[in-house]
């Protein structure tokens, strides 16, 4: 049974993927590279985490997939946000802003 840490990590990965796809459709490898490059290589998502998250999010209706050709001329599955996914992204970003604000207040508190 997943604990709170697992839920937090899964939720973090979901919102990062949703945000990545808010810029347009991408295949799995491109999602991982975008996250890595945008985070100055601080965030690296392993395939063993990325693809299960993509499949889970597709089942939930947050993203949809279609086959296409990658920039290297290879067949790849491209993912894009659905309307439900965009709504989920807005809700997740709001939640993260509340959480990061609360954590910031705690870390800055003086005893």
Image (cartoon, rainbow, N blue to C red):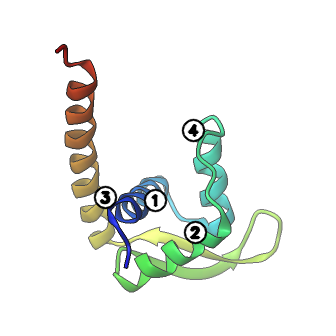
Q: Nearer the viewer, mark 3 or mark 4?
A: 4
In 3D space, how far apart are the residues under numbered discs 1 and 2 (Cα atoms)?
Answer: 9 Å
**Are the residues at dot 4 and dot 1 in contact (C-beta closer than 8 Å)?**
no
Q: Quadrant location of residue 101?
A: top left
Per the image, the residue denoted by label 2 is 49
The correct choice, above or below, for 106 with respect to 8 in the image is: above
Mark 4 or mark 3, which is nearer the start of the sequence?
Answer: 4
Quote the CA–CA distance across marks 3 and 2: 19 Å
Q: Please indicate whether residue 67 sits to the left or right of residue 73 in the image.
A: left
Chain-order first, disc 4 or disc 1: 1
Please tell me whether mark 2 or mark 4 is closer to you in this view: 2
Q: Determine whether 89 is above or below 28 in the image.
A: above
Q: Residues within 10 Å of mark 2 (few under 14, many from 20)?
A: few
Q: Which residue is mark 1?
A: 13
Check disc 3 and report the residue beneath it.
89
Which quadrant of the figure has residue 72? bottom right
Helix, strand or loop under label 1: helix
Q: Residue furthest front?
A: 111
First in sequence: mark 1 vs mark 2: 1
Q: CA distance from mark 2 to mark 4?
A: 17 Å
Label 4 element class: loop
Q: Are marks 3 and 4 in contact (CB under 8 Å)?
A: no
Q: Residue at x 59, y 46 (%)?
A: 43
Q: Secondary structure at mark 3?
A: helix
Disc nearest the viewer among 3 and 2: 2
Q: In this figure, which residue is indicated by the disc labeled 4?
A: 39
Q: In this image, 20 relative to 49: left or right? A: left
Residue 98 coordinates in the image, percent (x, y): 19, 41
Distance between mark 4 and mark 1 Cα atoms: 13 Å
Residue placed furthest toward the top: 110
Q: Are marks 1 and 2 in contact (CB under 8 Å)?
A: yes
What residue lies at 22% left-to-right and 56% top-to-bottom?
A: 91
């Amino acid at each position: 049974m997943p604990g709170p840490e697992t839920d937090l990590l899964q939720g973090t990965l979901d919102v990062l993927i949703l945000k990545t796809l808010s810029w347009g459709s991408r295949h799995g490898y491109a999602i991982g590279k975008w996250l890595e490059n945008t985070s100055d290589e601080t965030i690296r998502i392993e395939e063993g985490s990325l693809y299960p998250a993509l499949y889970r999010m597709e089942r939930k209706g947050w993203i949809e997939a279609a086959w296409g050709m990658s920039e290297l001329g290879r067949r790849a599955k491209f993912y894009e946000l659905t309307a439900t996914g965009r709504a989920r992204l807005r809700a997740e970003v709001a939640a993260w802003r509340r959480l990061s604000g609360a954590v910031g207040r705690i870390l800055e508190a003086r005893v």
